[in-house]
Image (cartoon, rainbow, N blue to C red):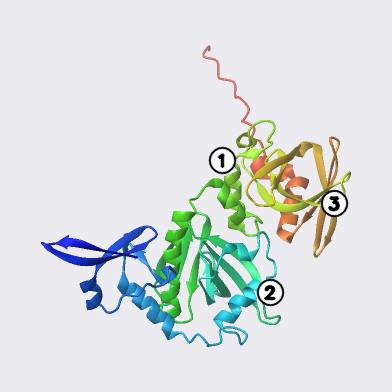
Amino acid sequence: MSARRAASAGTCQDEMELLEIGGSRKWSISEAQSEGSLHLRDPVTTTETGGKLRLAEEEDFQGRISELNPQAEVLWGRTREELKKFLFTQPITGWEGRSIHSLGEIVWSSLVLMRSCHMEEMSERYIVLFPFQLLILSVDHRKKAFVYQGLLPLAGMSVRDVPSDTGCMFEMTGPMIESRIISCLSPAEFHIWVLSIQQHIKMAIAHCPAHPSNIIPFLVPCDEPWKKRKLMKHLFYTTILKWEGKPIQHLGRIHYLAMVQVAYASMGDFKERLLVLFPEDLVFLAVDRERTGIAYEGKLPLAGIQAKEKSAVLGRLEFEITGSLTEPILVACSTAEDYEKCLFYLQKPEQNLDTVTVQPPPMVPKKSLQR
């Protein structure tokens, strides 16, 4: 915040300039005095619309926070502050990828009800807002623990109110996610969530421009259907390191994609791989540890390989790939759906209607014009 004097209508007037990422507004001392004392608030609690700061929304925001008792129990007898420490110190079931500490400071968190646009029933979720991502967790009340459900990037997302009896519902939509309907437990929390998410969406757009390589951490592991769909599309326009043979765009439409563990007979140890099934080829890809790039690991023709079940015991979903041109490959799937779909395409490619080549009808000889 800087102070300076500016000429206005022939007189000198003191002005103060309050700066924020992406916009600024000038405030005169007289204007500040008329609206009360001027406070420099936390930028997290300041909203921006059309490049101008709106003190009315900011004061409303602060008022909503003051309505919530900071010492009130939120979950399992813990306050909101205690749950913040819990998230950083206790393991989250199913968490994968980079450490939660790399996401930055927690802006806001609370217990909500949530559903996707394709579902009717609401599920209990604990959502956590970081500067550039929204973390979604389910709640295990028996173990008093959190279970990882997803990490949504804020850049490119939008928020809108959803009409409801309670007036506490909003929808989050974006180009990379399925829309989510979120119902807050109180009007105060609803207001805080909408204002803070809108603010951090703008910050995310300013600081994290969307490049193709930036979406890999949000799509891998592909543990949700929308992640699989987005990653399938992403493979066709991203650079795949060490790629060999004809371009991936010429292999046809992707029938199925799964993150699996692969072990070759000569190596023994399992490696994480993306298994991608095309109409005539099986492609293996590797994602680097930082989730910044994808590399080519090999391609097998479906006509030259066979797949047979190795083990279908819960927690050990494995099948083996054999062929005259490859050494045996053991593939372990993490879900029953991946296991069944992979086996279906590998064992019965000829019965997949998408891969059947439609033969044209036989030519009917033209009738002779001679009588």
User: What secondary structure is marked by label 2?
Assistant: loop
Q: Residues within 10 Å of mark 2 (few under 14, many from 20)?
A: few
Label 1 to label 2, Cα distance in Å? Answer: 39 Å
Residue 285 against residue 178 in the figure, above or below: above
Q: Nearer the viewer, mark 1 or mark 2?
A: 2
Going by the numbered disc 3, the residue's amino acid type is Asp
Quadrant containing the N terminus in the rendered view: bottom left
Label 2 to label 3, Cα distance in Å? Answer: 30 Å
- Whole-percent x and y of residue 224? 62, 59
Q: Nearer the viewer, mark 2 or mark 3?
A: 2
Going by the numbered disc 2, the residue's amino acid type is Gln
User: What secondary structure is marked by label 3?
Assistant: loop
User: What secondary structure is marked by label 1?
Assistant: loop
Going by the numbered disc 1, the residue's amino acid type is Tyr
Tell me: 171 left or right of 111. Answer: left
Tell me: 35 left or right of 180. Answer: left
Residue pictured at 56% horizontal, 80% vertical: 81
Front-most of residues 207 and 237: 207
Q: Which residue is mark 2?
A: 90
Front-most of residues 366 and 65: 65
Residue pictured at 62% horizontal, 67% vertical: 149
Label 3 to label 1, Cα distance in Å? Answer: 31 Å
Among all residues in the image, which is located at the extreme top?
A: 370
Q: Which residue is mark 3?
A: 269
Residue pictured at 87% horizontal, 46% vertical: 267
- Which picture quadrant has residue 206? bottom left
- Which picture quadrant has residue 123? bottom right
Q: Which residue is mark 1?
A: 237
